[in-house]
Image: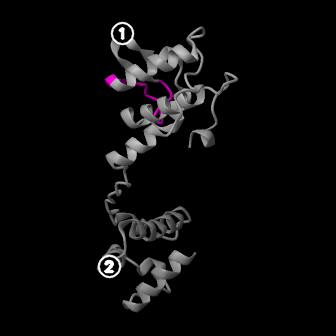
């Protein structure tokens, strides 16, 4: 494995006898991690390299080569995720002005974009919304199909509530258990189409 070779080279460069894995101790793995930090590697890269040593250590314990996994005693670094680019107000206005709302598809697309911008739900969650999930009396949207399996209620903004009412007049509400966002033939919309 490429990552184990990197570790091996590092250990040898630091005077650690790698001919017998039982001689490699926790402080050797810690030095490996701190040297990577000093060299400016990202937390993700450092965690990957140390995790490889931990996995190998687990294997050695399982095969009774080591009494315990010394690499497992090295804590993982906390890695902060960067916030992605967001639209400016003017960009968002231009995007929301793009659909031709005189057509069913245009009104549907505007409604979907507003659901995304005003609620922050995921694409898969939007695809699964049913007409019955919109509770106008409570001014809320029930998101049933979520990543973690826990349904949640999201308040509707005034703007989104108005556009949803208009969309539903055009969409029709004969079957309240039907998907909210459909193609003109009343079938669900593919992920790629929404994207």
Which residue is depicted at the point 45% across and 16% down? 165
Q: Do the residues labelled 2 and 1 touch (CB within 8 Å)?
A: no
**Callout 1: SS:** helix
Foreground pick, 184 / 103: 103
Location of residue 133 with respect to 75 vertically, above or below: above
Residue 73 location in percent, x, y?
34, 64
Which residue is depicted at the point 62% across and 43% down? 192
Residue 127 location in percent, x, y?
56, 31
Residue 112 location in percent, x, y?
49, 32
* C-alpha distance separating marks 2 and 1: 61 Å
Local packing at callout 2 (Cα closer than 10 Å; few below 14, some 14-19, many 20+) is some
Foreground pick, 57 / 139: 139
Which residue is depicted at the point 56% across and 11% down? 173
Magenta segment range?
144-158
Residue on which disc 1 sits: 137
Which residue is depicted at the point 55% across and 31% down? 106
Residue on which disc 2 sits: 31
Task: Please state, as top left, top right, bottom left or bottom right, where the N terminus lies in the image.
Answer: bottom right
Location of residue 113 with respect to 23 vertically, above or below: above
Nearer mark to the viewer, of 2 and 1 = 1
The stretch drawn in magenta includes residue 157: yes
Colour scheme in use: one colour
Of mark 2 and mark 1, the one earlier in the sequence is 2
Foreground pick, 111 / 71: 111
Residue 78 location in percent, x, y?
31, 59
Q: Can residue 141 be seen in this view?
A: no
Q: Which residue lies furthest to the right in this view?
A: 185
Foreground pick, 75 / 183: 183
Q: Residue 53 carries which label?
A: none
Task: Please state, as top left, top right, bottom left or bottom right, where the C terminus lies in the image.
Answer: top right
Local packing at callout 1 (Cα closer than 10 Å; few below 14, some 14-19, many 20+) is few
């Amino acid at each position: 494995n490429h990552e184990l070779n990197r570790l091996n080279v590092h250990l040898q460069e630091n005077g650690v006898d790698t001919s017998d894995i039982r001689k490699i101790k926790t402080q050797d793995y810690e030095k490996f991690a701190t040297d990577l930090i000093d060299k400016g590697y990202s937390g993700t890269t450092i965690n990957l390299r140390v995790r490889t040593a931990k996995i190998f250590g687990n294997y050695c314990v399982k095969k009774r080569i080591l009494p315990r996994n010394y690499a497992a005693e090295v804590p993982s670094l906390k890695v902060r995720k960067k916030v992605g680019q967001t639209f400016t107000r003017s960009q968002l206005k231009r995007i929301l002005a793009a659909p031709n709302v005189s057509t069913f598809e245009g009104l549907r697309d505007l409604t979907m974009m507003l659901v995304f911008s005003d609620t922050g739900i995921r694409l898969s969650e939007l695809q699964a919304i049913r007409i019955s999930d919109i509770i106008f009396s409570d001014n809320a949207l029930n998101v049933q199909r979520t990543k973690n399996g826990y349904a949640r209620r999201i308040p509707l903004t005034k703007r989104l509530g108005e556009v949803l009412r208009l969309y539903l007049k055009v969409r029709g509400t004969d079957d309240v258990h039907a998907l909210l966002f459909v193609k003109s033939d009343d079938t669900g919309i593919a992920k790629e189409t929404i994207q």
